[in-house]
Image (cartoon, rainbow, N blue to C red):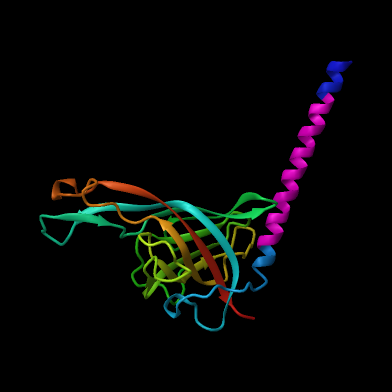
Amino acid sequence: MTYRLDRQGNKTVRVRRLFAVALVLGCAFCTATNAAAQPIKPPDTPTLITPPVGNSLFLVGRAAGTQGYICLPTSPGASTASWTAKPARPEATLFQSFFRKDFQIITHFLSPDANPNDDAPVPLPFGNATWQSSFDSSKVWAAVLNSNTIPAGSHPSCPNAGSIACLLLQSIGSQQGPTGGKILANTTFIQRLNTNGGSAPDNSDGCASIAQVGNQRLVPYTADYLFYRKSE
């Protein structure tokens, strides 16, 4: 009898835990959905990386991932090489905290722009920076246009000197999720702020000579990504 009671008690605990997880995930989904519909007060940022008037902040995610670099010649026919992030190869997961727990809300990666808009470059690169909602699989592709970047350490919104730059990206395409989800589909601009890490390695670390061309490195970084859409 005691054994059966113990089994029943363990089962009840598991059910309660599953219910709690489902409740938190439901709250996370509702929060992300509501965030997509309601403006949030944006931080103070330099004009160069501030979205134009008429765009409202609706979603913020804290990212942890890596920035990819490849060793390439410094110029055609050169005998020296250096690390480059072009084409950029970001890999990151974006989180929000609910009830003191972190939950994934977006994945950030490189993929072909499947639905380019009028701001997309022609021709399109083989891959573009992509953000995909973990809730409804909607996507936005975005690119840095007109050198809208500031060096890390140059402003309170980008305080960590020596890290990858903070920047403003413009949507160059978007896509609803397979069931019509639109959490990211209406994104117009994305800010990358509060960067920490991610800068290119020293050339002495695997890219000191032309013989090392083709070497690759993944450098960890964290950052905040802020998503904007047209104001209503």
Identify whether 232 is placed above or below 166: below
Of residue 103 and residue 189, the one placed in the foreground of this image is 103
Q: For the magenta stretch, what is the residue range?
A: 8-32
Of residue 158 and residue 102, the one placed in the foreground of this image is 158
Q: In which quarter of the image is the N terminus?
A: top right
Q: Quadrant of the C terminus?
A: bottom right
User: Most prominent secondary structure in the magenta stretch?
Assistant: helix
Say which residue appears at 86% left-offset and 22% top-offset.
5
Residue 207 location in percent, x, y?
Answer: 21, 49
Q: In the image, 6: left or right of 48? A: right
Residue 8 location in percent, x, y?
Answer: 84, 26
User: Which image quadrant is residue 182 in?
Assistant: bottom right
Which residue is situated farthest in the right direction here? 1
Q: Was residue 221 drawn as part of the magenta stretch in this picture?
A: no
Q: Was residue 26 drawn as part of the magenta stretch in this picture?
A: yes
Say which residue appears at 57% left-offset and 67% top-offset.
185
Of residue 62 and residue 176, the one placed in the foreground of this image is 62
* Total count of labels: 0
Residue 224 location in percent, x, y?
Answer: 51, 61
Residue 148 location in percent, x, y?
Answer: 39, 74
Say which residue appears at 11% left-offset and 58% top-offset.
78
Which residue is situated farthest in the bottom direction here? 53
Q: In the image, 3: left or right of 52? A: right
